[in-house]
Amino acid sequence: MQLYCPSLTSYKRLKTREVNVAGLLLGNGHPVRLQTMTTTDTLDTAATVAQTIRCIEAGAELVRITAPSKKEAENLLNIKNELRKKGYHTPLVADIHFTPNAAEIAARIVEKVRVNPGNYVDKKKFEQIEYTDAEYLEEIERIRERFTPLINICKEYGTAMRIGTNHGSLSDRIMSRYGDTPMGMVESAMEFLRIARNESYHNIVLSMKASNPQVMVQAYRLLIQQMDAEFGELYPLHLGVTEAGDGEDGRVKSAAGIGTLLEDGIGDTIRVSLTEDPEFEIPVCRDLVKRYTDRAATAKIIAPAEKISYDPFHYKRRESFAVGNIGAQQVPVVIADLSRIENITPEHLRSIGYQYDAASDKWNISDAAADYIFTGHQLLSFALPGTLKVIIYPATWLQAADKEKYFPIYDAAGYINAEQKSASLNFVMIDCFSDDTNVNDFTHLDELANDPSVVLCFSSTNIHAMPAVRRMFMELLNRNIKNPVVLITDSNWETTDEHLIHYSTECGALFLDGFGDGICLGMTQESYRLLASGKQDTSGRNYSNNNSVEQFINTTAFGILQATRTRISKTEYISCPSCGRTLFDLQETTAKIRSVTHHLKGVKIAIMGCIVNGPGEMADADFGYVGSGVGKITLYKGKDIMKRNIDSEIAVDELIGLLKEHGAWVEPA
C-alpha cells in the first residue's frame, strides 16, 4: 500500500475488513453507508422513535442514539421494540462515553455500540502526569479488565462496535505521552483495538474525529498506516468532522475533512455532524458519497508520480515566491468570477465585500472582500477600490490603459508565444490531466518555471480532478518550481449543498496538504442559471436574492480558507450537533451567540450541549459555552473554567462580558 491509500492518482476504494451490523455490511468494497444521530432525550421514547423514523425515511442506514447512563441504555429496548412494531428495522447504535455499565446493557439490545477510548475507562481532568513505562502498562491492563466484558457481550450477541476517538476527549494519560496530536488519537484507538483482537473480536469500525479538518485527515491517514504496519489488514472507517456547526460553515468544514478522504477511496460509513435537525444531515452525506459512483470507470488517466515529495501526515505549506500579493507566506488570495455579469457596476461589488458610499465617495471593504475579479472581456467604466485588481483575457488587457490594475490571463502556450506581457503579473492556466494521452501536461512547465511574473492557475476537467491537480503540485515539487499557484474549480452541480461539497472537497483537500496560494470558484452556465433562479437544497435554502450567486461563491471561497485554517476572515464556531445529552436548545443558542459575536474576526467560540466533548474540543477554541446542567451554563477560556453554572437566561450576556474581560471583544460597526 502506498502511504495511506491504494493510489494517489487513480481512484480505488481502500480494502478493509467486512463488518456485519445486523445484516448491513460495512467495508470490503460495500457502498459507503450513511448515518446520523438523534437529538431527542433517549428517555422520551415517543420523540426518539418519531425522530428516528424521520432519519430513516431521509435515507439513514444506521441511527445512533445516546445512552449516557444505565437508564437510557435500558430504554433502548423500548425504542427498538416500537420501531420494529412500526416496520422499521434499520440498525441502531448506542453512543457510550463514560459508563461501561451502560455499554454492556446496550450491547445486549441494539446492533452496534460506540465507545470513546478517551473516556470509557481513562479520565480527563486536564492533568499532566508523568507515567513510567511500568505505570503506563498498568493502566493498559486496567483498560483490558474493564473493556473485555463488553467485547464478550458483543461476541455473544453478534453486536458490532465502533471505537471512536475524538480529538477533544483524549485522556490525560494519552495527552501526557503523545500530546494533543493525531498520533495520540491513533494510539488511543489502537490500544482498544489490540485488546479486541486478542479476544478474537473483529466486528469493529474505527473513527478519528476532530473539529479541525486538518487534524482529522492526518489522524485517519496515520491510523491506516499504523493498522497496516501492525496487523497487515485494515478495519472499516467511519468518517466525520466533529462540531462542524450549521449552515454553510458546517457543510464546508465537513466536506473539506470527509471529502479529502473520500477522494482517496477512504471511508466505509459517514456522518455529517451539523447543528441542525438530524434528518438534514443525510442529504449532505448522500451528496458527498454520490460523487464517487462512477469515479473509477470515468476518470482520465493521471501519470503516477516517481516520488512523493510532500508529507501527507504533517502540514507544511508548499514553498513559493511572491508575485505581488500572491504566494510566499501571504494568505491565499480570493478571485471572484464576475464574467457572467454583462455590465459590471459598483453595486455588483457589494456581493464580493466592497460597498461604495456615494456621499463620501469612499469604499467600505469587508474582511471577506475578494482580492481580484475576473471579468473576461470586460473593462470597467468606474474607478476601483484601492486594493482590488482585475484579471482579463490578453486581447482585452492590451486595450486597458491602467496596467497597474488590470492583468492578463493566458493558457500556457499563449503566454509563451505572447509578444506583450505584463511586466509584473501574468496568470497562466494549466488544465491538469484532462485527456488520457497526458502529452501536454508537463510540456510547458520548464518554460514557465520560476518566471518571476507568472502565477500558475491549476484546474482540471478530469472527473478525478483533485488528484489530477495534486499530481501537478507534486511535479512542481519534484522539479523545484516555486511559482505561486491559484486553484480554479468550476461546478456543474445544481443545488447549493452540491456546490458547497464540490468546492470544499476539491479545494479543501489541496489546502489541507499545503497546496494553493489562491482560490477561484466558478460555475457552468447552466449551474449558474439554476442557482440564480432559486434552485434550492434539501433544507429549502437558496441564494437567488440580489446578485447572490456571486455572494454565495465569494462566501464559499472564504469559508474554505477558514475551514482549512489558511486564511481567517470571520468568527469560527465549534458547535456540536445536538443529542440526547444536550442541556439546552443548541440550534437556538448557536444562532443567538452567532448574532452577537459574528463580527469578531479570528475568535473561535465553542458551543457545546454537554460536558462529554466540551472541554476537550475547546482545546481548539478560545472561549467555550457548555451545558453543565438543565438550564445551567459553564463558561470557559480555553480549557479553564471562568464561570460555573450560570443561569442560561443570562449566559450569552455573561459570555460577552468574558470576551470583553479578556480583550477579545470589539463593538460591532
Image: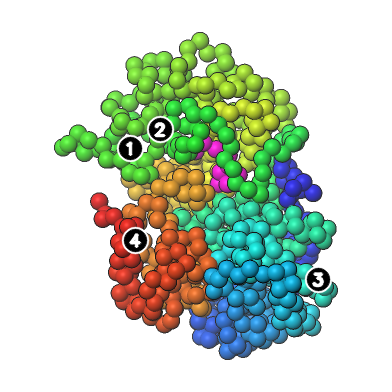
- Can you identify the residue that label 1 sits on? 349
The image's mark for residue 662 is 4
Residue 402: image location, x then y, percent: 34, 19
Q: CA distance from mark 3 to mark 4?
A: 49 Å
Please report contact status of discs 1 and 4: CB closer than 8 Å, yes or no: no
Between label 2 and label 3, give the one nearer the viewer. 3
- The residue at the point 34 percent across, 61 percent down is 662
Going by the numbered disc 4, the residue's amino acid type is His
N-term-proximal mark, 2 vs 1: 1
Q: CA distance from mark 2 to mark 1?
A: 9 Å
Task: Decide which of 212, 274 is in the foreground and name it.
Answer: 212
N-term-proximal mark, 2 vs 4: 2
Please report contact status of discs 2 and 1: CB closer than 8 Å, yes or no: yes
Please report contact status of discs 3 and 4: CB closer than 8 Å, yes or no: no
Task: Decide which of 598, 378 is in the foreground and name it.
Answer: 598
Number of residue marks: 4
- The residue at the point 28 percent across, 27 percent down is 383
Between label 2 and label 4, give the one nearer the viewer. 4
Task: Decide which of 366, 465 is in the foreground and name it.
Answer: 366
- The residue at the point 42 percent across, 71 percent down is 641
Is residue 591 rendered to the left or right of residue 449? left
**Label 3 environment density (alpha carbons within 10 Å; few <14, some 14–19, many ≥20):** some
N-term-proximal mark, 3 vs 1: 3
